[in-house]
Amino acid sequence: METGFQRGVNWWKLLRRPGFPYLFAGMFISLFGTGMNFAGVSWYILERTGSPLRVSFITILVTLPGLVVPLAGGVLIDRIARRYVGMALDLARGALVVAAALLVYLGMARLGHIYAMVFFLGVGFAVYWPTMNALAQEVIPREELVGANSAVLIAVQGGMMTAGAAVGFVYERAGLSGILAIDALTYFVAAFCLVRLRRGYMAPRAHPEDEPAGSGEAALAASVSERALAPDIVEPGLSTIFLRDLREGARYLRSQPRVLALGLTYACMMAGVLSGNVLLVTLAQFVLKSGARGFGFMEAGWAFGAVTGGLLAGALVRRFPPLAVLIAALAVLAVGHTLFPYARLLVVVVAMQALFGACRALGGVLTQTSIMTLVPRRLMGRTQSTFSVVATLLQVLMSFSLGFLAERVSVTLAFLVLGVLYGTAVLAAIRARGLSVREAPAAPATA
C-alpha cells in the first residue's frame, strides 16, 4: 500500500529523531490538561444542574468554533511556522484557564463564565489539532509515519484519557479550581516543549516537498500549485492570498476521492469519540451509579486500550492489509457501542472501554498515516482543517442529539445512534479501500 505502511515501527529510531521527543511530550502534556479540563467541567456542570443535556452543551461549545475557525486556521497553518502557531495557542489557552481558575477559587464563577472558557478553548483547539498533525508531518519522514502517528496517538489518547482517569480523584479533593490550575500549568509546559523542538523560524513553504509517488499525485500537486510556484509580479492583498489558498485546497480535495473518503472516516470516528463523552458521564452517574470515581476507572480503561492499540499498530499492518484492520476496528466500535448500555457491571464497562480505546487508536493511526502519505505537505494544513470542520459539524449535531435522547428518551437509544455514526465510518473506510484497490493497477502502467 502507501509508503507510510511499508516499514515496521522502529521506536528507538523514532525517539532519537531530533525534535520528536519534544513534540511527543508537548502533545501529551497539553492534551493531559485538555482532558482534565473537559472531564472536570463536565462533572461540575452535571453536579450543578443534574442534566445530561446541559453537559452536552459543553461538547457543543468546545467544538462549535471548529465550524468556522479551521477555514482561516488551515491557511494560517500553511503560511506561518507551525511551531510558532502551537506555542502561541498553548500560551493563550494557559492564560485563559488561569483566569477561570481564579474565578472558581474565589467563588465568583458563574455557569456563563465556564461556558465562555470552554468556547474560547474550543477556538484554540480548532487550530491546535491540525497544527500539530502538520508539524508531525514536517518532523518525521514519510517512511516512519506509522510509528510517528502511533506515538502521536499515544500522546493524545494517553494524555486525555490519563487525565480522565485522574480527574475523578482530583475533583473529589481539589474541586474544579484545582483541575483548572493543573490544566493551565500543562499548557505552559507544552509551550516550553515546542520552544525546545528546534531553533529558528521555518515557514511551511520553506520545507522541501516530499510528494507521494504514484496515482498521479505529484502531477496534481504541480498543477494546483502552479500559481504558488510562479508568484504574481504585483504582491496580492491578504484577502486575495487567503481566498486563493482556500480555492487551491478545495480543488485538491475535489480531485482526490480517496482522501475525502479517509477524511470522512476520520471525522465520523472523532465525532463519535468526543460526543460519546456525554453518554459516558450519564452511564457512570445514572446507570452504573459509580460517580466520578467510576468514570475515572472507565477513562483509565480507555487510556490503557489506546496506548496498547498504538503500540500494536505497526505489528498489525505488517501482517494484515491496513485498511482491512481499519474496517475491523471501526466495526467493533459500531457494534460495541450499540451493546454498551446492556453492560451493567463496572468491570465489564471498563473492559469494553479498553477494547474501544484500542480500536480508536488503530483507527486514528491508520487514517492519519494514509492521509499524511497521500497529501502534499504544503496542503496538509488546509486538508486537516477541512476534515476538522466536518468532524465538528458531526460533533455538534451528535452531542445535542445524544444528550437529548439520554435525558428525554433513553440511554439505550442514544447509544444505538452513536453506533450508527461509527457504522457510517465503516462504510467510508470500505469506500476508501475500494478506491485504493481500483487505483493500485494504474501504477505499473505508468512506469
Image (spheres, helix red, strand yellow):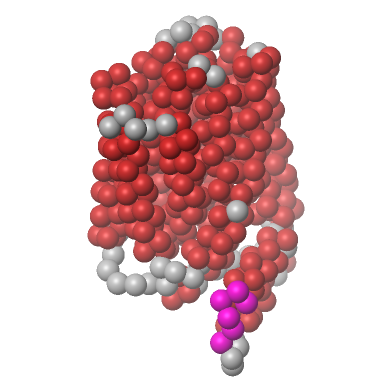
**Does residue 162 belong to the magenta stretch?**
no
Q: Is residue 420 above or below residue 196?
A: above
Residue 211 % position (x, y): 55, 68
Question: What is the residue that sits farthest to the front in this orientation?
Answer: 108
Quarter of the rendering containing residue 412: top right
Q: Which residues are magenta?
A: 235-240
Q: Is residue 414 above or below residue 382?
A: above
* Residue 288 place in picture, x, y as percent: 48, 8
Answer whether residue 301 is visible to the viewer in this image: no
Indicate left or right for 218 with 105 as reference. Answer: right
Between 85 and 115, the one lying in front of the other is 115
Is residue 238 inside the magenta stretch?
A: yes
- Residue occupying the far bottom of the picture: 233
Q: Give residue 434's position: percent from left, percent from top.
A: 73, 46
Q: Report x, y in % for residue 234.
A: 59, 91
* Horizontal arrangement in the rendering, residue 92 relative to residue 255 (left or right): left
**Where 199 sits versus 336, above or below?**
below
